[in-house]
Image (cartoon, rainbow, N blue to C red):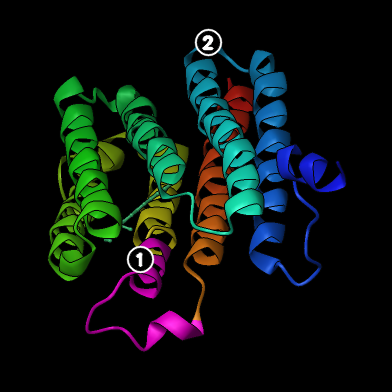
Amino acid sequence: MDSLLTNISLITKMDPNDYVGFTFFVGCMAMMAASAFFFLSMNSFDRKWKTSILVSGLITFIAAVHYWYMRDYWAVNMESPTFFRYVDWVLTVPLMCVEFYLILLVAGAKKSLMWRLIFASVIMLVTGYFGESVYRDQAQVWGLISGLAYFYIVYEIWFGNAKKLALAAGGEVLKAHKMLCWFVLVGWAIYPLGYMAGTPGWYDGLNGLFNMDVIYNIGDAINKIGFGLVVYNLAVNQTSKS
Ligand SMILES: *C/C=C(C)/C=C/C=C(C)/C=C/C1=C(C)CCCC1(C)C
């Protein structure tokens, strides 16, 4: 009876040394708290900024729901919840692209910019999923293709059309755009490291050094919550000025 009960419980007994499981739990709670924060602050902003804050909240909320499942999946199976991870990313990363578009609307950003970024992000994630999950023995090739899509996004926001719009907008929008650019260049670069720690390739030395899920969980907390806070900060500045 006892063993039956432990087998069907949603969360098995947690091992105190399970630091991977620990980061799943903390990540889940952080995403929930951030969502409450963004949603509840929404109404204190001008209409123009409400949508941006709503999207910040949606990003952390979608992550919170997936972390709820990933936390469980890890506790029960002790293996990477790759499927949930990528479902989360394929919803939240395009929303981060939408954030770029939304803050650049003041300078007349076109929908085509948003769609280009979204398209590149989906390519980046689908090829990453292939390498991590479906064609693991070709992880290097899929990782490379994914990396190219990633560099396209970096190029577009740092030097392309998005950058021109940010310059045209100037002021706080330019500052916020720059911060978001740094998140994509440095914060997002955490993910390929996790990928290399979790897949076979020339970088095999990384496998034992780092744990893929810990790296991904740290990356998610920094990028989803940090990204949202940059937008929040912009909305605060713009609202108090007008
Ligand atoms: C909230 C989730 C975010 C911001 C996820 C971002 C994910 C990436 C930037 C992933 C990038 C990858 C590469 C550039 C190459 C290897 C495969 C990936 C998918 C891990």
Q: Is residue 119 left or right of residue 237?
A: left
Q: Residue 55, labelled with which disc?
A: none
Q: What residue would you read off at disc 1?
A: 195
Q: Nearer the viewer, residue 74 or 59?
A: 74
Quadrant housing the C terminus: top right
Could you tell me residue 224's position as x and y percent? 52, 44
Residue plotted at (29% across, 54% down): 133
Residue plotted at (53% across, 10% down): 47
Q: Callout 1: helix, strand or loop? A: helix
Could you tell me residue 93's position as x and y percent? 37, 39
* 197 to 1, vertically: above or below: below
* 45 to 142, vertically: above or below: above
Report if residue 203 lies within the magenta region: yes
Could you tell me residue 151's position as x and y percent? 19, 58
Q: Which residues are magenta?
A: 189-209
Q: Residue 47, labelled with which disc?
A: 2
Is most of the magenta stretch helix, strand or loop? helix
Residue 171 visible? The answer is no
Report if residue 129 lies within the magenta region: no
* Three-letter amino acid code of the residue under disc 2: Arg
